Image (cartoon, rainbow, N blue to C red):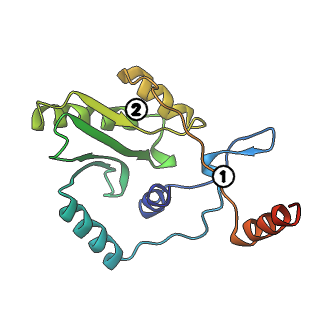
Amino acid sequence: MVRFAALLRRHGLPVTPEHVTDGVRTLEQLDLGEITLTPAEMAEWYARMDIAGMIDHTMLTREPSGVISGLTDVKYFPYSPKLIHQGFTGVRPDARRRGLGKWLKAAMLLHIRELYPNVEVVVTDNAGSNVPMLAINTKLGFKQFRAGSEYQITRDQLANRVRTLAARR
């Protein structure tokens, strides 16, 4: 989640709460705090990717002004040659409703199909509240095979909860 939010912010995309249902906060509403990535942190990330043998592919779109309007990335692990992980896909709010997200994701899938013809499975993650990306993934043929939940608690809240539970013994 931290990488997702940092990637959003790094490319000028918002990380804002949008949906609340019965008091349950969506993934986008978790308290992430201010997340910044320095060039040194990015260099460390890419060094770790190299050590793991991970190959990252990123595709982006630019507006006539040169501003990045959207991007998508995939990860390929040579030790798992039949699998690709489709990572982040995002479009700046001012560039949405033009089909850029769908185009980027489809173009990347065609690209990796050429690069890695032995790949049989592409996996991706999607917040249930991200209706536009769910629609894109459905149109591209992705099917849900696993669902998960994210939980968050502060250290102080956790300490209080542990004390409360310990006192009940």
Mark 1: amino acid? Gln
Mark 2: amino acid? Gly
Name the residue rendered at 57%, 70% in the picture. Answer: 34
Going by the image, does 127 lie left or right of 38? right
Name the residue rendered at 29%, 32% in the picture. Answer: 122
Residue at mark 2: 99
Q: Is residue 99 above or below residue 59?
A: above
Q: Is residue 47 above or below residue 73?
A: below
Residue 39, image quadrant: bottom left
Instruction: Tell me if mark 1 has few (under 14), some (14-19) or many (20+) residues whose alpha carbon lies within 10 angstroms of its own.
Output: some
| Foreground of the two, 161 or 141 | 161
Marks 1 and 2, the one that precedes in the sequence? 1
Helix, strand or loop for disc 1 = helix
Name the residue rendered at 46%, 26% in the picture. Answer: 144
**Outermost front residue:** 169
Helix, strand or loop for disc 2 = loop
| Foreground of the two, 12 or 120 | 120
- Viewport quadrant of the C terminus: bottom right
Q: Which is closer to the viewer, label 1 or label 2?
A: 1
Going by the image, does 20 lie left or right of 123? right
Number of residue marks: 2
Residue at mark 1: 29
Name the residue rendered at 66%, 52% in the picture. Answer: 29
Q: Which mark is residue 162?
A: none
Residue 99, image quadrant: top left
| Foreground of the two, 134 or 162 | 162
User: x and y percent of residue 17 in the render?
Assistant: 67, 50
* CB atoms of marks 1 and 2 within 8 Å: no
User: x and y percent of residue 89 in the render?
Assistant: 39, 44
User: x and y percent of residue 52 in the render?
Assistant: 21, 59
| Foreground of the two, 90 or 149 | 149
Q: CA distance from mark 1 to mark 2?
A: 25 Å
